Structure formats: C-alpha cells, structure tokens
Image (cartoon, grey):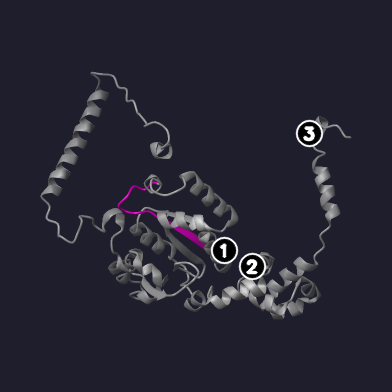
Amino acid sequence: MYEAHRKKLKTLKVYFLIHSGTVEEQSYLTALRREKEAFEHLIDTKSRMVVPEDQDGKSDSCMNLQNISSQVLEKNTRQGGREDPKNHYVIVDMREFRSELPVLIHRRGMQLEPYVITVGDYILTRDICIERKSISDLIGSLKSGRLYQQCVQMSRYYSKPMLLIEFDQNKAFTWQNYFSYLEGSFDQVQQKLLLLTIHFPKLRIIWSPNPYASAQLFEELKQNKDQPNIEYATSIGDELDINVFETKYNSGIYDFVRKLPGINSKNIDTLLRRVKNMKNALKLSEEELKDILGNTADARAFYSCLHGEHSAADDEVNIKNKGKGKFRRGFKSK
C-alpha cells in the first residue's frame, strides 16, 4: 500500500535482518519452505483441474460472496415461517442492467424493481439512494460536472445519499491502472472528490473492489430498514419536476428554505407553492403555517425561527467577554 500511494517515488525496498545459525532463522526458513510447497501444490492442482469452457476458473464462493438466496428463503421464525422475498426489493434504474451488479443482487435473494429513475441508480430504502460509478465513469463525471448535479439531486430528495465507486474485479484495487491513458492526474481527481464531500456533508462514499462486494454491501444496508417507495422514486427528478425547481422555485432558494427548522422534503413543495416570498411568510400565523406544513411541530419550529428574538448586540458582548480570559495579560488594549 505504501508503494501504491507513493507511486512517483523510487521502488520501495524492504531489508530483513536476522542472525544466522539461530532458532529464529530456522523458523523463518521453515515458514518459507511451507509457503513454497503450498504454492507448488496449488499450481499443480489447478493445472490438472477440469474447468468448463464457459468459466474462467473464478467462483462466487470467494470471500463469502456466495449465493444465499436459498438461505434467505429457508429462514424460519416461530410464528411467521418463511419470509416473503417480495418484502425485500431494490429499485434499479433500467440502464444499470447493462452491468453485472443487478444480477448479483438478485442472486442474493433480493427482488429487483426495474424502473426509469432520474435520481440515483439504486434505491435501497426510503432514505438510501446510491449512484454507482466505475473508475472511468467517475473521472469523466468529475470533469464534466455531471456528478455534482447528481449529488445535488440525491441530497435534495434523500437523507442518506451515497456514491458507490466500483473497481474492476480483474484489476488491482488501486488508482494507478486508470491514469496511464487518461488526461489529468490522480491528484486532480482526489481534490475534486474532497470538494464534493465538502459541498455535500451528507454524501457517503463507498469503495468497492468488485460487484460481488457491492451486492453484499447492499444486502447489509437493507437489513432492518423500510423498503423503498416506488411511486416516490419514479416521480421525482423528471423533466416536469426539474423545470419546477429550476424556473419556478430557483434551486438556490430551494436549498436555503430546505435547511430552515421545520422544513423537510414532505412539506417544502407546499410551502413554496403557497408562500410567494419571505415577507409573506412572516405575516402568517402559527395556525396558518400548520395548515400549510401539515404538522404542528414543524409549524411551531418554523414560526419560532421566523419570529424568535436574535440579538446581535448580545452576541458581540459575548465575543468580547470571551477575549477577557486568562490570556488577557498578553494583549494591550488600544
């Protein structure tokens, strides 16, 4: 890992020192001999192994990533018996079926719901939305700015947006193999990823070595979680919805209002449609806000935010008092 991270420096060399003619030396030589014999036995066994023509020798049982759909169906409870596989489903964008991941998700016992969705690629729960990117797609999306817009949409509609960066299972789990033939450098991509996490604090980045690990991760993320809402996932982000946000609401105003107390994804659309500007919002009573937001607690929080007393003078006094502590002797008043 050190050599992979310091790829621009010279090749890493490790020097191993040991006393000759000691028990430590014999133990080390014995370990080397056993390791050599194990590899020779493995090579000899694979050379005589019968493998079908349509298989390259890989097995799905590696790293505990086997098909567990039968295990899922055979789970019994004292009262309910077998679990219904329809209760565990994932909403998948139709374009994702060109990749291997949807098939692996299905093989792990989860039902696939293929739809054309414009926000995210995989909807696991009501809160979790995942955008999957291969390394080449990630680099291209970062350069074009498309990934930024996708993160804006995911953060706007879901409370737990995630970016899945999936490596090729036939290549090493490292960046080096992807920058030899593409413009730019690893440092530029790394800087853009850092900026992405700064702009979107809720965004979580998932690093996956192969599609098998991604399928296993999806299953773990769905454990004990509510199933996704198909109607909601297919209705958000369409052309009509995008025009409403960009032309009628203004994305900057939308993001600002969305961060106010008492405002969430369920009531912000109603608020922006029924209230023209902040001046009109200040004239509304708490009962009127309750009728708009549909919730007493949200209305009270939003009303308190608009009409609560915020004294700037008190803040200035507190700031001045903080400077009069135990370090006051080190400063001279002007």
* 10 Å crowding of disc 2: few (<14), some (14-19), many (20+): some
Q: Which residue is mark 1?
A: 152
Q: Residue 299, image x and y in percent?
A: 71, 73
* Rendered position, 91 above or below 180: below
Q: Residue 56, image x and y in percent?
A: 20, 56
| Label 3: which secondary element | loop
Q: Is residue 148 left or right of residue 80?
A: right
134 magenta-colored: no
* Rendered position, 75 above or below 27: below
Q: Amino acid at mark 3?
A: Phe
Q: Which residue is mark 3?
A: 327
Q: Earlier in the sequence, mark 3 or mark 2?
A: 2
Q: Which image quadrant: the C terminus?
A: top right
Q: Which residue is mark 2?
A: 251
Identify the residue shown where x is 68% and y is 72%. 298
The single residue placed furthest to the right in the displayed view is: 334
Q: Amino acid at mark 2?
A: Ser
| Gap between marks 1 and 2 measured at Cα | 10 Å
Task: Report whether residue 79 is seen.
Answer: no
Q: Between 45 and 115, which is closer to the camera in this rendering?
A: 115
* Rendered position, 30 above or below 81: above
* 10 Å crowding of disc 1: few (<14), some (14-19), many (20+): some
* Rendered position, 163 above or below 245: above
Q: Between 330 and 190, which is closer to the camera in this rendering?
A: 190
Q: Residue 6, image x and y in percent?
A: 43, 36
| Label 1: which secondary element | helix
- In magenta, the rendered stretch is 161-174
